[in-house]
Image (cartoon, rainbow, N blue to C red):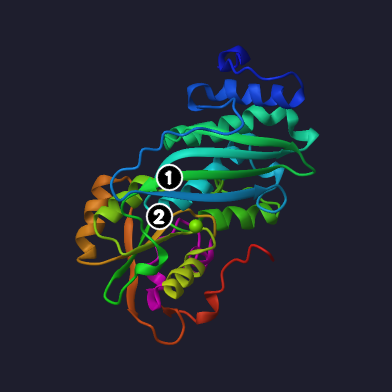
Amino acid sequence: VSDPQRANIPMGDGAEFDAIREMLAEWGDLARGVGDDAALLDVALGRGEQLVVSTDASVENVHFRREWMTPEEIGGRATAAALSDLAAMAASPRALLLALGVPESWREELVRLARGVGAMAERASCPIVGGNISRARELSLTITVLGSTAAPLRRSGARPGDSVVVTGRFGGPGAALRALLDGNVPTPADAARFASPVPRLEEARWLAKRGAHAAIDISDGLLADANHLARASGVTLSLDLDAIPRVDGVTAREAAASGEEYELLVALPGDARVATRDFAARFDLPLTVVGSVVAAEGEPVQLRGAPIDLARGHDHLS
Ligand SMILES: [Mg+2]
């Protein structure tokens, strides 16, 4: 896998091309159509299918610190975060582009970063079709993903009477982050949820097929993202704080505020109990009803069993 000749891309000499060759060698067949000024994609869209595009930046000392994760985890986590936005739309990944800002102190770790990106892309069956590499003061990975779907889920489709359901269990990334910031060692389970999130791509398509009306992925925290969905839909989400499924050792409040979960929050019509049972049988993951959609009244998110000051969430620019 580490044989640069395998990439067999006619490129020039120099440090930049050496770096690109190393990454292409690491990715092997996962890298497609690289070598021209731009990628040519055979995106044959089916009837009614739309292209879905999203981009996401992961910046050292803003989104993570070097000592918190392995380079493989940093690459995989950045890729999962980008793919999670396709999951939120119930789209299937089609291609990925990676723009890297690389300080000299990270140069030796480039292949390990690429390995993390490649492993997550492969898991999502998503070819890597291009990118860019530039010297920078801090490491950054900006990942653009292209997907497609004939039945996109959006934030704006929730209707009164829908159930509000979530995938997975909450609180792990928040607990890991608190431990790291306090100079403690997170539990292995919390550390794994923080460093190795999984985009819920298949789960989202399953829920879309099941008739879901709206969805969002949880990057800012369950309550903050519930707010985004409620505002976009012009409804109120009435949530039961105690119903939020959570990992061991965290409170309901912590679970509700924990960001970078990359789980899904979905507005689902019909009998949600049947859906949760079928979902659990299909995926090794719980689907849990945490509330219901009601007509807009007062705050976009109303919490049973807690004061509303919780629903502030995370501000990327603060
Ligand atoms: Mg998102």
Label 2 Cα crowd, 10 Å radius (few <14 / some 14-19 / many 20+): many
Give the magenta part as a residue range: 233-258
Residue at the image position 62 percent from the left and 45 percent from the top: 142
Relative to 168, 35 lies left or right: right
Foreground disc of the pair 2, 1: 1
Residue 221 in view (yes/no): yes
| The one of 225 and 177 positioned closer to us in this rendering | 225
Marks 2 and 1 close (CB-CB < 8 Å): yes
Name the amino acid, label 1. Gly
Residue 285 in view (yes/no): no
Of the residues under marks 2 and 1, which one precedes in the sequence?
A: 2
Query: Where 59 sits versus 96, above or below?
Result: below
What is the secondary structure assignment of the residue under circle 2?
loop
Label 1 Cα crowd, 10 Å radius (few <14 / some 14-19 / many 20+): many
| The one of 248 and 44 positioned closer to us in this rendering | 44
Q: Can you give x and y, in whole percent of width and height, for residue 98 in the image?
A: 60, 38
Residue 147 - label: 1
Q: Return the residue at label 2.
A: 89
